[in-house]
Amino acid sequence: MSWAKKLRDDFTAMNSIYESDKLLAEYLLFHFGTADEILPQYRTWPAGMREALEFPVRTVAHFTPGGAATGLDLGCAVGRSAFEMSRNCAHVTGVDFSHAFVRAAEALRVGGSLTYERSEEASMRTGLSARRPAGVDGENLRFIQGDAMNLPSDLGVFDRVHAANLLCRLPEPKRLLGRLPWLVKPGGELVLATPCTWLEEFTPAENWPTAGTLEWLVEMLTPDFELIRRAEEPFLIRETARKFQWTTSLVTVWQRLG
């Protein structure tokens, strides 16, 4: 077996977790859950947890205000950021590696709601419903299953490209970074968010940044992009009633040079 084939097979196996009902439910809650569904008011929560909600909305807000013709959301998961991009883009495409995530996003686009179960503890579950964001009809959206490292050659060129918490989950992130100049129109904007949690189960150590992630991105993208803004955005993923993932992503905003 070739090294490249083994890497691809390992990638497929590792990402099978993203097809599970458990993770699908966690991401539906992460993307579409209300503040009270994620952090019920009957408990007192540590400072900062509520500020970490609605991460998929906050990352999209880093695009320059105003309208655009086309948008692309890479690693769109169950679709919240793509829905938010569609408010200001005439046409938006969402791409994710997970078949289950894409099916869920499409179900919300077409039907407006999707039921799922929130895990409490042990076998206890609470039924919830994810709903398409208010004011979004989904008519200018499409969701497709795809590999961010092997995007279709005819995917198109976009005014806005968004990729949140994707880079450090790719076996070969440089393959995506190398494709970005052909995905963003001259003058267009790119928003990258990454928690910089480089793990060997997703990315072989030889493919990690050799210095800090920010310095690596500047080195990789500067020939074609100008870094115009950077920020830190926290996010919160609820696993059970008493277990949460609290993480901070580095957000960088780039303009494609002409």
Image (cartoon, grey):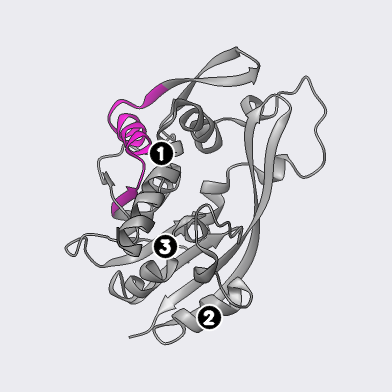
Quarter-wise, where is residue 47 in the image? Answer: top right
192 to 220, vertically: above or below: above
119 to 58, vertically: above or below: above
Q: CA distance from mark 3 to mark 2?
A: 26 Å
Mark linked to residue 218: 2
Q: Amino acid at mark 1?
A: Ser
Residue, disc 3:
66
Q: CA distance from mark 2 to mark 1?
A: 32 Å
Let me know if residue 170 appears in the view.
yes
Q: Position of residue 129 (x, y in %)?
A: 47, 21
Task: Name the side, left or right, on which 184 lies relative to 77.
Answer: left
Task: Name the side, left or right, on which 115 lies relative to 106.
Answer: right
> Residue at horizontal 67%, vertical 50%?
247
Considering every residue shown, the one lying at the far top of the view is: 124
Q: Secondary structure at mark 2?
A: helix
Q: What segment carries the magenta color?
A: 91-114
